Image (tube, helix red, strand yellow):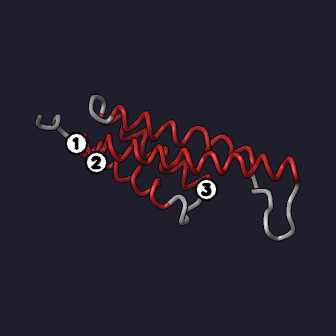
């Protein structure tokens, strides 16, 4: 289970990096060039989006990396990342896989009682 949590955390973190790049870039683009009618509007709280664009992927990757040796801490970090992505970006077509994979990885890491068999 720890190996599965490790893989899910790393893959979710990499997918979250892509979402984070676009989320951060979008807020900067709108701030620089202004809104485009109904097509592109600034988010309600750009600072929250920018902070979570940075922090959520890092938590997912760090939690996945810790899943084998410190499963409780790794699982908690992945669940925090999952909650941060949901709070910052919502659940949509771009975030459903990182959120689901990070949440499942966190649950698997917390549920792992003994080290995986070699």
Callout 3 environment at 10 Å: few (<14), some (14 to 19), or many (20+)? some
Residue labelled with disc 2: 108
Q: Is residue 19 or residue 55 the one in the foreground?
A: 19
**Rendered-image quadrant of the C terminus:** top left
Residue 6: horizontal and vertical position, in percent?
32, 40
Q: Earlier in the sequence, mark 3 or mark 1?
A: 3
Q: Are marks 2 and 1 in contact (CB under 8 Å)?
A: yes
Measured Cα–Cα span from mark 3 to mark 2 = 24 Å
Residue 51: image quadrant is: top right
Residue at 60%, 46% (x, y): give it: 20
Disc 3 vs disc 1: which is toward the camera?
A: 3
Q: Residue furthest left?
A: 117
Measured Cα–Cα span from mark 2 to mark 1 = 6 Å
Q: Which mark is residue 89?
A: 3
Residue at 46%, 55% (x, y): give it: 99
Q: Residue furthest bottom?
A: 38
Question: Relative to residue 56, is residue 51 drawn left or right?
Answer: right
Q: Earlier in the sequence, mark 3 or mark 2?
A: 3
Residue 79: horizontal and vertical position, in percent?
43, 46
Residue labelled with disc 1: 112
Residue at 55%, 65% (x, y): give it: 92
Question: Relative to residue 36, is residue 26 drawn left or right?
Answer: left
């Amino acid at each position: 289970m720890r190996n599965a949590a490790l893989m899910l955390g790393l893959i979710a973190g990499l997918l979250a990096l892509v979402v984070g790049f676009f989320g951060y870039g979008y807020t900067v683009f709108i701030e620089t060039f202004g809104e485009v009618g109904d097509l592109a509007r600034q988010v309600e709280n750009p600072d929250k989006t920018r902070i979570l664009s940075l922090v959520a992927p890092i938590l997912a990757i760090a939690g996945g990396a810790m899943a084998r040796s410190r499963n409780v801490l790794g699982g908690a970090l992945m669940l925090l990342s999952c909650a941060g992505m949901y709070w910052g970006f919502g659940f949509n077509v771009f975030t459903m896989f990182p959120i689901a994979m990070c949440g499942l990885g966190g649950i698997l890491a917390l549920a792992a009682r003994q080290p995986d068999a070699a």
